Amino acid sequence: MNLRPIRSQRPHTRTRSGMTDAQMDAVAGLFGVLSEGSRLRLLQALHDGPANVSELVRSTGMKQANVSKQLGVLQGAGVVARERIGNEVNYWIEMPIIRKLCDLVCTGIAQQASARADVFKRRP
Amino acid sequence: MNLRPIRSQRPHTRTRSGMTDAQMDAVAGLFGVLSEGSRLRLLQALHDGPANVSELVRSTGMKQANVSKQLGVLQGAGVVARERIGNEVNYWIEMPIIRKLCDLVCTGIAQQASARADVFKRRP
DNA sequence: TTACCATATTACTGATTGGTAATATTGTCA
DNA sequence: TGACAATATTACCAATCAGTAATATGGTAA
């Protein structure tokens, strides 16, 4: 990941696809948020519904400080949202495309894996 | 991005979704490859078909050394492939889900932007 | 061979980041 | 009030990385 604000080499040009470089960097930023296994594990743990920090610590096996930190990154990007209830804080997935995105990539990874398996099948 | 081999805190456990942590890290790795604006710009330039390095240097405005370097990252991840033709080297997008992936995120970013615009519309 | 072109690699720097231990904050309950 | 539980923050380190200038490599043509 890289949260350096916007350090594009071509700050304000507009690409043929109609995306500005700033929008491109925004897309890159979202990918960056998803580019860490620990954060993906948190999102997976939130897949079925909200959970508080303690539950996430238990279900992911990560340290509490790290869970809080990475949840902060996810929240900063608008991927998750939070609500305090008494002593506890509930988190849930707020960005609707996240599920589609992860499903797509997981399918892709699986396809790639089976394609690679096919390579071995081709000449036994 | 982060290409540290696999430094998951839970190396070999299997998650409820059936994904191993190693697969999770692989997914994170792919997101990492897409988490840099320069690499997304290269992929966009390759969107309509193959191009050689000089063409990519021209169309992206990046320095030649950086274009080569980032193409190397993309190729290492299997996102692009290459073929030498005489003095030149052609690159093209090899991983089919890349286009879907970027389209999905770009739509998401656009929706988020318009949703945010709606917030301002609500109270004029 | 030499000259030249296109691409890749090397070495480097400044900056960012994930994970952690320790500590702080915020809320509940008695 | 004090004690406790849940969560967030701070300070730190080691590792990583993007971009660049300089250089190397590999191919073509004369």
Image (cartoon, coloured by chain):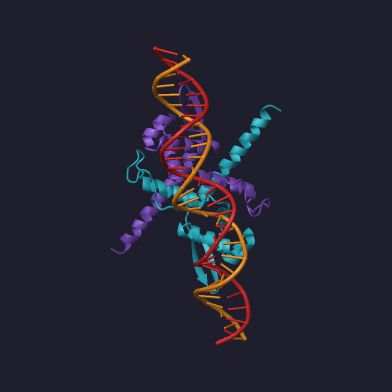
Chain colours: A purple, B cyan, C red, D orange
Return the residue nearer the eye: B55 or A6.
Answer: A6
Can residue A19 be seen? no
**In the depicted structure, whether residue D7 falls above or below residue D30:** above
**In the depicted structure, whether residue A51 falls above or below residue A112:** above
Residue located 51% across and 49% down the image: B100
Residue B47 point in image, percent of width and height: 56, 56
Return the residue nearer the eye: A62 or A77.
Answer: A62
In the image, farthest residue toward the right: B124
Instruction: Specify the quadrant that holds the C terminus of chain A.
Output: bottom left
How many numbered markers are drawn? 0
Can residue B37 be seen? yes
Residue C24 point in image, percent of width and height: 51, 29
Q: Is residue A47 left or right of residue A25?
A: left
In the image, farthest residue toward the left: A124
Residue A113 point in image, percent of width and height: 37, 53
Residue located 59% across and 38% down the image: B111
Return the residue nearer the eye: B107 or B20.
Answer: B20
Residue located 46% across and 39% down the image: A99
